[in-house]
């Protein structure tokens, strides 16, 4: 049960509704792309 | 064609090949430097290198897609969302043109996150759905989990964008509750996959946001359970920022459960971590929360101690709104203790700051 004291103070305590975790952005790495290409050419030479 | 003519032709072809080769090499060098700079968090410099790489140009469309994508992400981290939208959109068009499904899924995910931040939730949902559909078609579990997490974030943000007008967690209009319930469903669906994959870092993020969703839904016990899981995983990784967030969110949930002593313990851990991380703004917020919690506990001496700490940091940071709040809280605590002169001093200070910051409700409260 929430008391009125809790109700009024809660809005002052945390008006944003909690701290969120960071967004996860998708990555397209050039380093990975070229190491895969390099590995591919090494494998095809063997 | 005579011999001389064919030799001239060969030389022109060779020259053109060399020009293209050098162009590709310098574009790539610039882009790789941009990638390195973004990896170390220097997004501003990273953007310059990526823009230069685009100026030079490339015929490798996979390279171009990666540059667009990384430029979009760099602008996203710089909070320039219009630019982020522009480049993620270029990436989406390009990947669709070349029929790169995995690339399209990633571009859709990034575009969805950007639309979400801009409050364009309907467009964000379309992008998340495309991301999820492709991941399902390709039987890509990691992609599915990521799309579901993004979906959860979109519905959480949508719910929050319409809910904050004085109402309390659990008491929002039905439209808000519906969006928040959807967010919780997507987070649960994500959790089922990331648990199967054994991806603890992803579980940690989802538990954190699921905890905040339960909190807004008014399910404070569930919120505590989720944030406890988030805290556990943050400790496994030694991720002190995530640990601090979890302690703060736990403190907030315990306030609503009426367990003020427990809330205070969690806010104290938040304060310790904020000091270790040298994050002054968060340190100020933790002091403010502690001051308010001790007010609820009617321990006004301690409340004053924390509100004074908050006031000092707010003054250091030149945060006039924070300073005003600290003065208001100090005025109340001194009134409760019967220190009328001190109470008057802080009430006057609060009024002065409210006038300066244009805080009309603060000004009216101060006059009361």
Image (spheres, coloured by chain):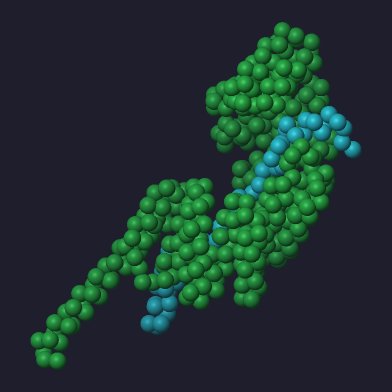
Chain colours: A cyan, B green
Locate residue B19, reporting x and y percent. Answer: 24, 70
Looking at the image, residue B367 sits to the left or right of residue A6; the answer is left
Q: For the view shown, which residue lies furthest in the left direction?
A: B4
From where the camera sits, is residue B240 visible?
A: yes
Looking at the image, residue B237 sits to the left or right of residue A44; the answer is right
Looking at the image, residue A21 sits to the left or right of residue B87; the answer is right
Query: Where B103 falls versus B354 (above or below)?
Result: below
Number of residue marks: 0
Query: Which residue is at a point 42% across and 57% down the rendered structure image?
Result: B35
Query: For the C terminus of chain B, which image quadrant?
Result: top right
Query: Which residue is at a point 66% across and 18% down the rendered structure image?
Result: B351
Write down the quadrant of residue B28 in the picture.
bottom left
Query: Where B42 falls versus B9 (above or below)?
Result: above
Q: For the view shown, which residue lies furthest in the bottom direction?
A: B1
Write down the quadrant of residue B71 in the picture.
bottom left
Query: Where B317 falls versus B84 (above or below)?
Result: above
Query: Which residue is at a point 62% across and 17% down the rendered structure image?
Result: B352
- The residue closer to the viewer here, B292 or B327, is B327
Q: For the view shown, which residue lies furthest in the right direction?
A: A1
- The residue closer to the viewer here, B204 or B295, is B295
Locate residue B75, reporting x and y percent. Answer: 48, 52
Query: Which residue is at a point 39% across and 49% down the rendered structure image?
Result: B45
Query: For the N terminus of chain B, which image quadrant?
Result: bottom left
From where the camera sits, is residue B223 visible?
A: no
Locate residue B273, reporting x and y percent. Answer: 63, 36
Locate residue B141, reporting x and y percent. Answer: 65, 69
């Amino acid at each position: 049960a929430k008391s009125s004291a809790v109700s009024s103070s809660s809005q002052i305590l945390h008006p944003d509704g909690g701290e969120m975790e960071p967004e996860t952005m998708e990555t397209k790495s050039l380093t990975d792309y070229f190491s895969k290409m390099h590995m591919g050419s090494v494998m095809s030479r063997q | 064609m005579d011999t001389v003519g064919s030799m001239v032709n060969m030389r022109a072809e060779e020259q053109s090949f060399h020009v293209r080769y050098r162009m590709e090499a310098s574009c790539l060098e610039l882009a790789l430097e941009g990638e390195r700079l973004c990896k170390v968090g220097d997004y501003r410099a990273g953007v310059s290198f990526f823009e230069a790489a685009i100026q030079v140009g490339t015929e490798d469309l996979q390279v171009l897609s990666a540059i667009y994508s990384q430029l979009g992400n760099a602008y996203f981290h710089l909070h320039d969302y219009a630019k982020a939208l522009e480049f993620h959109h270029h990436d989406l068009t390009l990947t669709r043109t070349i029929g790169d499904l995995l690339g399209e899924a990633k571009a859709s995910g990034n575009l969805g996150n950007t639309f979400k931040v801009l409050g364009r939730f309907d467009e964000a949902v379309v992008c998340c759905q495309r991301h999820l559909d492709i991941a399902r078609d390709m039987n890509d579990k990691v992609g599915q989990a990521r799309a579901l997490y993004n979906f959860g974030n979109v519905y959480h943000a949508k719910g929050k964008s319409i809910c904050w007008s004085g109402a309390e967690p659990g008491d929002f209009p039905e439209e808000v509750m519906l969006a928040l319930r959807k967010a919780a469903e997507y987070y649960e669906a994500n959790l089922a996959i990331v648990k199967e994959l054994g991806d603890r870092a992803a579980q940690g993020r989802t538990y954190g946001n699921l905890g905040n969703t339960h909190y807004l839904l008014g399910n404070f016990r569930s919120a505590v359970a989720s944030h406890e899981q988030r805290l556990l995983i943050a400790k496994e990784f030694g991720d002190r920022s995530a640990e601090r967030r979890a302690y703060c969110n736990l403190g907030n949930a315990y306030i609503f459960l009426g367990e003020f002593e427990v809330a205070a313990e969690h806010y104290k851990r938040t304060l310790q971590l904020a000091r270790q991380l040298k994050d002054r703004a968060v340190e100020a917020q933790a002091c403010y929360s502690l001051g308010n919690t001790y007010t609820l506990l009617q321990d006004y001496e301690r409340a004053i101690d924390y509100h004074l700490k908050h006031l000092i940091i707010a003054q250091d940071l030149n945060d006039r709104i924070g300073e005003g709040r600290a003065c208001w809280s100090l005025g109340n605590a001194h009134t409760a203790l019967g220190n009328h002169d001190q109470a008057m001093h802080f009430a006057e200070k609060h009024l002065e700051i409210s006038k300066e910051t244009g805080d009309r409700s603060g000004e009216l409260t101060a006059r009361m």
